Amino acid sequence: MAITYGLGANPFWFFVDKTGAPLAGGYMFSYTNSTRTTKKLIYQDPQGQFPYSDPIIFDGTGTSNALYFKVDSDNPDDTYYLEIYDQDSVLIRTIDNYSPAEGSGGGGNVNVNLRNYITNGQFWRNSGGISTVGVSLPLLMKIAPSAHDGFTHGNAQQYTGSDIVFQKQSTNSIDTLTFGTFTSSSLPGGVTPQNYVNYTCTVAGAEDFKFIQFPINRYVKANLNNQNITFTFFARCNTGNTALQVVARNFFGDGAGADPDNIQVLMNATLTNLWVAYSATISLTDVSSANLGPCGNDALFIQFNLPTNAITSIDIAIPGLFLGNIAPSEYWETYDQLNAVFSAPRTGFTKIGIGSDTDTFGYVLMDDGTLGNSSSNAITRANADTFPLYNLIWNKILNVAGPSYVPIYNSDGSAGTKGATAVDDFTANKQLSLPKNLGRVIAGCLPAQVAKTFTTAFATNSQLTLSSTVSFNTGAPVVLSVTAPDTLPAPLVAGTVYYAIRIDLTHIELAASPTDAIAGTFITLTSNGTGTSQTVTVSPDLLGEFLGERTHIQTAAEVGSHTHPASLDNTRLFAAGSSGSGDFVQNIGGSSLPVTVGFNSGGSPMNWFQPTTFLNVYMKL
């Protein structure tokens, strides 16, 4: 056997990028051609004593130093497979079956951008998971931010919205989901992120599905349809069932006529107790003939199907989906790159400006108009792309507060009635109102009622002790309730509206009016009450609720308590009127007579506006 090291090009290799410029900062990986995944080193010297690091980095002129390639005379088919990338990790060229004895080798320019189409496989900004011992995970929970623009959940069976989610069929099992932290470069041959996700089931339960789902892109008939993709991830099994299946899920949208989801198996992996890199190349199913739903929210997802009816503990790290038949041996996105996606405005977010409604694409002007599909005759926007916002308003406001805040109309403009779901109303061509905005300020609200049980210590400033006073801000209206035979502290009455005075993180007092609450004038309690069912509830300001008025004529009942003093000068009475001046009333001849001083008001309406600047407000579709 003769091992030699041949000079591939004399004296240097030179590469250009896809525009013809020198490949400054580019780099090259070298593999055995037969596997194209096994590393095969290149050397700095003809004796093969000093291998280059992998990858080999090109200098500012797109050239490398002399490259010596290993040649085995007894195994001449053991050639090189080379991949050349630019500094942005774009694949510029592949050279297959290369040997220095054969000149410059074969292959060609492919210019494939090896971009990871799974947004946030690093689980950055994750939820922290749920790890309470003995408590089953909820049926659905978002676990980390991800792709979101245009994704809309309306499906009644399985989640079809944005972000990375965990979902299962039932709560029969007892399971936890947490995010582990790498403390070193623990992944073999790959960049190691900060976090990985762990799923653990300690008590198995009857169920048909349990998965972690990643959104990929909207519109399944275009984009990645029928394309070759390579899917990669790292995983290990700590204990129990070792099976992990990865599938592509084509969801064909909501509404009548949509085909059932198309599920394509990408990989069936049998995990070990060590971190292992798994990879599969496959052509995604051609769904160009599928029937889509009328809501236009069809989308592609990747799911990790976790073992069902089984005890297990599985870790998963940095999944990646790449266009084409190859994947980079290492890939990475900085947290700033990920935050650029997470921080992008989501459906329902608002912004202000002075442009017209045509100047801000992807938003609608909050002009107190309506939304709907292309056949709805909606005033603000009638288009299929309104469904995400339509669905959000329908579920968050119409379904909670009712049509008094966001009225619903038929396509002819007549008053409509609320259907069973947002999908039903959208596909029935109904118009849905935007939240009222014109001439109004925007204020924060509590999204739901917040109820807390409490104990009292009437001897200590009549305070109520809560587990937390978050949402119980000073001036917030609250009501009390109690279950017989328990009793409330005297003189408090169940169902009566009181007003909170926030003392600290766990204590409040109650006032009889908002004015008293702001002044710190609390109701003095004379007992602690009895039992453990004493509850105080802060009433919410509902999403979409609108209150207030532009101008207001003050009524007598709204005038603060005050006096108009009178003075006696011998036999004449002077009284201070509403203007504050002394007005002669009458001769009283030394007798004592009752005097009534009346109001003197013009009754003009007062401006009820705070100092205000008017701008356009837009809401994200």
Image (cartoon, rainbow, N blue to C red):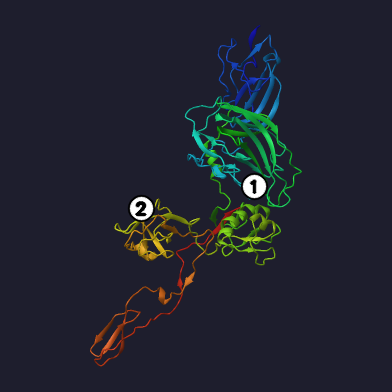
Mark 1, secondary structure of its residue:
loop
Q: How many marks?
A: 2
| Residue 140 coordinates in the image, percent (x, y) | 57, 45
Which amino acid lies under the numbered mark 1 shown in the image of this protein? Gln
Q: Nearer the viewer, residue 278 or 512?
A: 512
Mark 2, secondary structure of its residue:
loop
Asked whether the viewer can see residue 467, the reply is: yes
Q: Is tag 2's residue or tag 1's residue first in the polypeptide sequence?
A: 1
| Residue 525 coordinates in the image, percent (x, y) | 33, 62
| Residue 206 coordinates in the image, percent (x, y) | 60, 40
Asked whether the viewer can see residue 91, the reply is: no
Q: Name the quadrant of the N terminus.
A: top right
Asked whether disc 2 touches disc 1, contact meaning CB atoms under 8 Å apart, the reply is no
Residue beneath disc 1? 157
Q: Nearer the viewer, residue 233 or 332?
A: 233
Badge 1 crowding class, 10 Å Cα cut-off, few under 14, some 14 to 19, many 20 or more, is few
| Residue 527 coordinates in the image, percent (x, y) | 32, 61
Q: Quadrant of residue 88?
A: top right
Against 68, residue 248 (above or below) is below
Badge 2 crowding class, 10 Å Cα cut-off, few under 14, some 14 to 19, many 20 or more, is few
Which amino acid lies under the numbered mark 2 shown in the image of this protein? Asp
Residue beneath disc 2? 504
Q: How many angstroms separate mark 2 from mark 1 (CA)? A: 44 Å
Q: Quadrant of residue 279?
A: top right
Report the residue at 64% width, 25% height from top: 83
Report the residue at 65% width, 67% height from top: 415
